[in-house]
Each structure stands twice: as C-alpha cells, then as structure tokens.
Amino acid sequence: MELGLQVDDSRAPYTVLAVKGEVDVYSAPRLREKLVELVSDGHRQIVADLEGVDFLDSTGLGVLVGGLKRLRSHDGDLTLVCTQPRILKVFEITGLTTVFKISESVEEATGDRPGNE
Amino acid sequence: MTAERSLELSVPARVEYIAVVRLVVASLAIARRTLAEDRIDDLKLAVSEACTNAIEANLESGADNPVVVSCWEAPERFEVCVADAGVGFDPDDLPQHPPVTDPDRLNFERGLGIPLMRSLVDDVRFESSPGGTAVWMTLFGGPEFGDETTEILRVVISEQD
C-alpha cells in the first residue's frame, strides 16, 4: 500500500503532515525524506497527523524520533496527532509517549479551536 | 502439546514482502484462533519486526537467501517462526537505549524491534548461531469458543485441508 503524505501549510506557523497507510521498513524512507525536505524548506513546527495510519512499526518510530531530533536542532518541534489505540500502544511500549507531544486532533496541536476562524 | 506446522512461506529478503507476510500470518491467526482484535494487531507488529530484522540479517550476510516464515499450531498456542540465514547475534547482549528522559535518547532511531516483540507476544525465543537466527513468537489462546465468523472460517479451512 502506498504511503500517503499530504502537506497543509495553511495553519502557520504550523505545517501539518497527514500520513496515511502503513509505515514500515518499506515505506518509512519516504516519510523520512518528506520530513527532511520540510525542515530543509524552513518548516519548524511540524504536526504529523497519524490518524490515517493503519500500521506503524519500529522503523516508523525511528523516523519520527529522527524528525524530532532534526527539528529540535533547528529550534523547532514535532507534534503528533494520534488517538488510535493500536498506534498509541507502540509509543507507550517504547516509552516514547514522554518524548513526543501527542495531541488528540490537529486543532489541538495547532492551538486552533473548532469554529475559530 | 506438540505444535504442528500449518503454514510455511519462503519470501525473498526484500522489504516490500513484509506487508504480505504480516497479512498472511494475521489472516491465518484470525481464521484459526480465538484471539481478540488487539492481539492480532500485536502479532502483526511482532511478525513485522522479526521479518525486518531477518531481511536485514540476510542482506548483511551478502547471500541472496530467502526468509522462511512458518506458523505452528497446538490446541493452546499459535507460534510463528521467522528464520534467516544471517550471521546470528546474542539476544542477551543488545545495546541499551538511554532512558526516555535523557536528551541523548533522540540519538537512537533503531533497536526498538526486539523490545517491541518481547512486549507484544506471550513468549519470544531466539535460536541464533553463526548460520542464522530463528525467532519464535508464541501467542497463547486456543481455537475453542470462537465467535461465529471464526467458526465458519475454520470450517472452510479444515475442508480445504
């Protein structure tokens, strides 16, 4: 299954990267490339929306850890949006829930409130 | 009780095959066993991690050997074995990650697969030698008391045997 990566930069200063599909050792390099590209293009507050992710393994976790490290070295940050128990569980087992900021919605991650236009 | 092999897959050591393996193993487990949905998710992830390591081990060894995945069943358990022909490793001598509270933790992007496997399934055994590694993952839970769908699938499969 092809990994879906959609960038929404309409929520400045945040850049929302919506990830869809299965993130494993086959597809994770594309996620890494996209994160590297966004940081290189000057994006510093990235929100990775994982609500469309069906499967995430340790390679995917590694790419997100790498993205967080890259962003922090540029005074930026990587926030995750994730409410799916099967995906959250992977972060919980590895202790990474304390490393990442994990929000329940893109609105929460970007500080928007529903209806606030 | 002795487990019997119910499936064997030999797949090229290429990463695009991992999704196929986890789908096949999960489908078999759903059809044959009474396992909650989240246990199937756990199995898929553990199998995926084992396959990732096996493929890397085969590629590092330089030989174009396949990864062999087999499923074994006994009344009380479902086992998956993922075997590679890599150079082997010592499962008791894995590098430790800094605690998550340590900023250096971000320097470690790899090495989470085996801890994940150990957390996800009921038992993990490594049989490793210089000729290769076999990872055995066990989920306990019998085929009895399945829901109706599971029962129907089991009948269909047994008729095909």
Image (cartoon, rainbow, N blue to C red):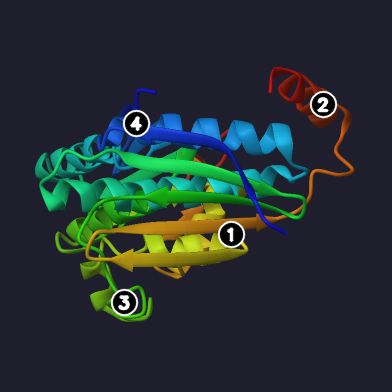
Label 4: state its secondary structure: helix
Label 1: state its secondary structure: loop
Q: Name the residue under label 2.
A: B149
Q: Check contact, mark 2 vs mark 4: CB within 8 A.
A: no
Q: Mark 3 points at which residue?
A: B97
> Looking at this view, is B42 or B21 the one in front?
B21
Residue B17: which numbered mark, if any? Answer: 4
Q: Position of residue B31 (x, y in %)?
A: 71, 31
Measured Cα–Cα span from mark 2 to mark 1: 24 Å
Residue B121: which numbered mark, if any? Answer: 1
Q: Position of residue B148 (x, y in %)?
A: 88, 28
Mark 1 or mark 3, which has the lower sequence index? 3
Comparing labels 2 and 3, the label whose residue is closer to the camera:
2
Q: Residues within 10 Å of mark 4 (few under 14, many from 20)?
A: some
Chain for disc number 1: B
Comparing labels 4 and 3, the label whose residue is closer to the camera:
4
Q: Quadrant of residue B6?
A: top right
Chain for disc number 2: B
Chain for disc number 4: B
Mark 2 or mark 3, which has the lower sequence index? 3
Measured Cα–Cα span from mark 4 to mark 1: 22 Å
